[in-house]
Amino acid sequence: MPLRLSGFRQKMKRPAFAACLILCLALIGLFVYRTTLHQAERNWAGEVHSDLVKLDEWLTRTIVSAKDDARLLARNLQTNLLDGPDGGRYLQQYLKAVRRTNELFGHVTVATSDGKLLQSNIWPNGGISEDPRSSASYIQAMSANGEPVVTAPYRSADGRFVLSVAAATPDRLGVVEMSVPLDELYAAFARHETVTSGELYIVGIDGKPAPLRPGAPSGPTFAGFAAGGSSGTDEAVIAQMTNAESGLTLINVMNLKTAAAAGDPAPKMPIVVAVLLALVLLAVLLLAKRYIRLIRFLIDAMRRMKRDNWQDRMNPPADGEIAKPYDTIDCITESLRSLVYYDTLTLLPNRAHLNEILDRELQTAAFENSEIAVLFIDLDNFKRINDSKGHSFGDELLRQAANRIRECVPSSGTVCRFGGDEFVIVLPYPNRQHLLPKTLNRLQQSFENGMPVFEHTVYMKLSIGAAMFPKDGLTAEELLKHADAAMYKAKDLGKNNVQFYHSGMKEQLLKRTRLEELLLSGLYRGEFEVVYQPQIVARTGQLRGFEALLRWNCPELGQVSPADFIPIAEETGAIVPIGEFVLREACRMNGELYRRFGLQPVMSVNVSPVQLKQVSFADRMIHIIRESGIPAERMELEMTENTVIDTIDTSLEWLKRMQSFGVKLAMDDFGTGYSSLSYLIRLPIHTLKIDKSFVRDMGKRRSHSILESIIQLAQRSGFKVVAEGIERSDQLQRLREWGCDYLQGYYFSKPLTADQMEEYVRLNCSRQSTAGVTM
């Protein structure tokens, strides 16, 4: 009996022991489960709060930028954009220029004080009533003393979530309301895996919550709860934060059960089953360890290629037969990385790699509270050399220039090829040991020596723009844009110099963009005018002809100098139709002078290098002259030395066609360019026009000798000579003594409008036929 009891007890002990063991394991598992769950929830809440802080910082930067741009836009809007039947069209043109400088703009509307509503039609705006003056944004902006205000958020007709920033114009003629899309805010929120089941709301100044995600509940039940509070349902306000710049409140709402599940790393099944499954899984993993490592390696490689992540090298699996695919994949990865991130011509990091490098340096600088210099470099006159010498020559020149730039930059900096003949230098800690001024000085000194390219020696100069972090921008995009603006300023100041960005350049860039918008439309609106400056025969004082000069009187910008708009017209290609307009007007005026006064003057018209590069240049010029009906020998085309020399391979045949047609050809600004006698022999030139700088400085001994020599050399070579810039009688007398053929300048007359020229002809030439008919 005792044996039986003992055996029974032993039988009972085993299940009891197993049960106790299972229970203990279950309790331990439950404890671990709950502890891990609570810790996960705390960690998750901390991550959500940290993410919300980043979203709040992004929103602050966005709204500050939007306010600045709304204030600038409201200040720059003028009455002719708000009034008149063409107000909407002018506004459209203006907004295109604005959006080129800042892609933050979404939809922009202008509500005028007389009830008109003008808009850009980029996004339909459902938040404005028929009378815009009754809208909340109009009322708030008008009462804000010129400061921009942030209105309640709303969802546009295309489903995008936007805020409105409104600002009144200084003259209170209207209110500018700019829609700021918050797509990036929600995208940044949705990128975090811990919040994929949550919703992000913005509570505007009207107290109404608005969801960022399309289709999210628009009337949540959490309104008024404290952070972490509950409404009795599964919803809770996990984190909330009020934006100091706009007064808007960001609220993160999460389903508690879903949040717990998302943060729960503990097993969901009974502990025993989980342990058994874990043991089975462990056995499988041990058996297939090597194969799993290879599979993981292959999957990781594919994911990196898909994400364009080429920065970090992958760890290979263990040695042996199974690791052989690594070498092939690593070789492919390195080749793709070179193609994606490096310029094949100069072997420098390319534009895509530059953004990653600059973002990484900006994060370090922000953490260390240090500075970064971004230098934007453009090779002066590279396009002219590339067009004249060929692309192979240009490629070799770019390689040589890239090597010189790289040698001038310290090891802490990075040189990238931005595109074309543009390079960017990222220089951390620019103020340590005067690193920035030393680098700039080395760059300029390095390019003072010529570069050997094939059998030629090329002398290249640099235009450099600089922007500093954090003073000039906080993001890579801002710094590059501002450094680019500074580089263009360096070019405007004569090239071969360094300019540092300042806040006024943004407005200058905006004006330049606006000038581009108005330039071509100004031609079709009849804003351009041709004026005419007389040319006088030096020996007799009679009229030889006129030089046709272009003037632009823009209703919005006023009288625009040719020095400002001609370079832009050449860059944009607008110089082609503008040049044809000048030629037509000059031909028309030449015919008018003959019909009314019996005069046949020589009419000189300037030709741009962009026009000379046009395939149909000669055909177009001949067609216009034939269409006017005037004799071809009464027209003269003026080209600068550099224009002719730079395009000589393509333009020589066309110039000979123009000469055979009867048109005279003149070389303008002679003496300031190449002044090569070999080119003069090859070119079908009839007249040399001496630059006015020689006439202005003819009192100086050297200029005096050069000017006299040019006139004598030209006459012995069979060229006629025109001296421009005559302002004094002593200049006139000396040029006559030297035998100069024709004279032009303010001493005789300023450029004349069509009406003024009629009076000039009546007073000076009514009884004379035009001199110099045979030349």
Image: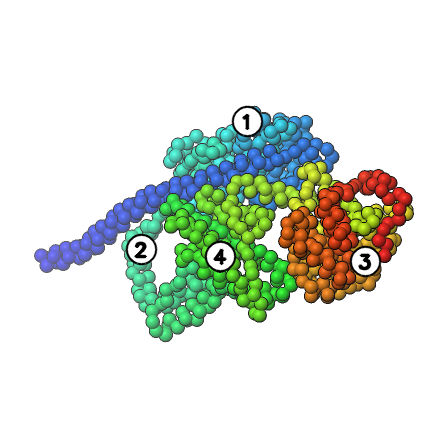
Measured as percent of width and height from the top left, residue 28 is found at 24, 49
Q: Nearer the viewer, mark 2 or mark 1?
A: 1
Measured as percent of width and height from the top left, residue 59 is found at 48, 39
Q: Nearer the viewer, residue 360 or 750?
A: 750
Residue 144 is labelled as 1
Q: Residue at x 74, y 35 (%)?
A: 85
* Quadrant location of the C terminus in the rendered image: bottom right
Measured as percent of width and height from the top left, residue 10 is found at 15, 57
CA neighbours of label 2 inside 10 A, class few (<14), some (14 to 19), many (20+): some
Does any portion of residue 618 appear in the rendered image? Answer: no
Disc 3 to disc 2: CB gap under 8 Å: no
Q: Nearer the viewer, mark 4 or mark 2?
A: 4
* Amino acid type indicated by mark 2: Ala
Residue 445 is labelled as 4
Q: Residue at x 75, y 47 (%)?
A: 733
Q: Which residue is mark 2?
A: 274
Q: Nearer the viewer, mark 1 or mark 4?
A: 4
Residue farthest to the top, as pictured: 143
* Quadrant location of the N terminus in the rendered image: bottom left
Whole-Å distance between the Cαs marked 1 and 3?
65 Å
Q: Earlier in the sequence, mark 3 or mark 2?
A: 2
Q: Nearer the viewer, mark 1 or mark 3?
A: 3
* Amino acid type indicated by mark 4: Gln
Measured as percent of width and height from the top left, residue 545 is found at 81, 49
Q: Earlier in the sequence, mark 2 or mark 1?
A: 1
Asked whether, in this view, residue 20 is left or right of residue 212, the answer is left
CA neighbours of label 1 inside 10 A, class few (<14), some (14 to 19), many (20+): few
Residue 663 is labelled as 3
Disc 2 to disc 1: CB gap under 8 Å: no
Secondary structure of residue under mark 3: loop
Disc 1 to disc 3: CB gap under 8 Å: no
